[in-house]
Amino acid sequence: MQINRPQKPKPDERRKVRFREEARAIVAKDRYDRKYGLAVDTAGAIGRALERAYRQGFEEALVGPTETAQVPAAPDLTDPSGPIDWVMIPPRPRMAFWSICLFILGKSESQERTGYVEPAVSARGTPAWRLIASNDREIKVIAEKTILPLVRLGLIALNDDEDRLQRLLISDSGRATWKLFLERGGRFPDDLIAA
């Protein structure tokens, strides 16, 4: 007699991202509640999150993966100019990328803008990058540790012109990612995360 063993689920990056976002929300609520002297129920929030995850896993085991689990999570590495799913960008770099795209690319293709990100030093004296928009207008300084994941993901890249100063520009993949974000109705950095 052969025993049917349950199959292990395949790794799903989108599921991992959803769980991390939920964990961040729980931690943020806990910190806020503690700061303002409100009732704290972190253990209850974690328990409810685990229960939802268990129910979701149980349902997927019975009926198969849900539609959101079937959406390809990882970028197509054979196409370096293709878009990356918005939820796959980590939270802090996502906010920085949103700012960079908003000030350099704008929200519509009819806006002709230029801009770049150049090396700088933060107010604390740590390495950083300064966002420069049209007309050499300085927008903000972004920490280097926030920018590096965007470079690793291929959303921004060093300019190819050796005669010019070292600058980061939005790559083709970054442009495609921003365009897809806007087409899906994204307006703010945390839009399309719960999808």
Image (spheres, rainbow, N blue to C red):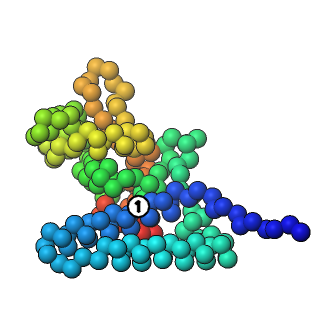
Residue found at the very far left of the displayed protein = 123
The image shows residue 177 at horizontal and vertical percentages of 42, 52
**Residue at 19% across, 39% down:** 130
Question: Along the horizontal axis of the image, is 8 left or right of 117?
Answer: right
Q: Is residue 95 left or right of residue 32?
A: right
Q: Is residue 1 left or right of residue 173?
A: right
Residue identified by numbered label 1: 20
Q: Residue at x 36, y 43 (%)?
A: 150
Q: Residue furthest front?
A: 1
Q: Nearer the viewer, residue 155 or 27?
A: 27
Above or below residue 122? Residue 29 is below
Classify residue 47 as left or right of residue 121: right
**Quadrant into which the C terminus falls:** bottom left
Image quarter of the N terminus: bottom right
Identity of the residue drawn at 60% across and 75% down: 58
Q: Give the residue furthest to the top.
A: 163
In this rendering, does residue 183 appear at all?
no
Residue type of the residue flagged with mark 1:
Arg
